[in-house]
Amino acid sequence: MNRQTCLHNKVVDYKIIRSAKAKRLRLAVYCDGSFVVTLPKNFSESKIEKYLISKSQWIISKLDFFKKLNEKQQIPTEKNGLNVYKKDALDLVNKRLKYFNAKFYNYKFNQIKIKNQKTLWGSCSKRGNLNFNYKIIFLTPKVRDYIIVHELCHIKELNHSRKFWNLVSIAIPNYPIIVNEVRNKGLYTCPHISDHTLR
């Protein structure tokens, strides 16, 4: 269900999704500029507008961030973006993975793939394949390194337990600061933001 609202004198398009699994209202802004509001099964739609207004500054800042990120690429389509930047992204990821793995971890992993993922900066499969979004090359070096180390540590711990974060801290001891910073900028380990929820 597609809707529109006006926030800070800007018309904002968004999509409503109802989810039986959702326990609270959730806002998510994706790297392609789409904005999704996920509602619990029995949540009243009459409350949405008021909540969006209360979080308008957050919403606009995230939409603006991804708009600037996409404009920076100066390419006509997402598909072309992957074609243009895939090799550069792969070279960068390979270089940094080799560095961190040799210095701190010595893990065995399988393939490294660069993809055009809508909702992820990176991922690690159960088979030990590491996947990264080509847009990682547009992030700052410390954020790129954090994402790369994050996924590398999933080779050992395919979860977000304390053991996992202890592994991350070996190479990125200040990771909590980086996590907080990238959240505030509209980034996380995946290129969408969904920090704001309402019960």
Image: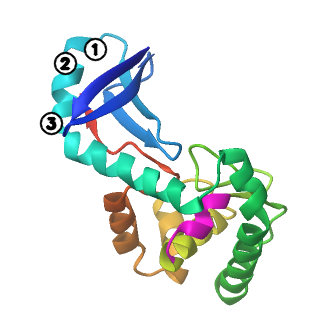
Labels 3, 1: front one: 3
Q: Are marks 2 and 1 in contact (CB under 8 Å)?
A: yes
Q: How far is mark 3 from mark 1, CA to CA?
A: 17 Å
Left or right of residue 79, residue 148 in this image: left
- Give the position of the C terminus as an image quadrant: top left
| Label 1 crowd bin: few (<14), some (14–19), many (20+), radius 10 Å | some
Q: Which residue is mark 1?
A: 43
What is the crowding at mark 3: few (fewer than 14 residues within 10 Å), some, or many (at least 20)? few
In the rendered image, which residue does mark 3 sit on? 54
Which one is closest to the eye, mark 2 or mark 1?
Answer: 2
First in residue order: circle 3 vs circle 2: 2
- For this rendering, which residue is in front, 129 or 134? 134
For label 2, the crowd category at 10 Å Cα-Cα, with few meaning under 14, some 14 to 19 and many 20 or more, is few
Residue 13 picture location, percent across and down? 38, 28
- Label 3: element kind: helix
Give the spatial CA distance, label 3 vs label 2.
11 Å
- Residue at 35% across, 35% down: 27
Look at mark 2 in the image and give the residue it sits on: 47
- Residue 93 seen in the figure: yes
**Is residue 44 visible to the viewer in this orientation of the structure?**
no
Q: Amino acid at mark 3?
A: Ser
Identify which residue is drawn at 61% across, 60% down.
135
Amino acid at dot 1: Phe
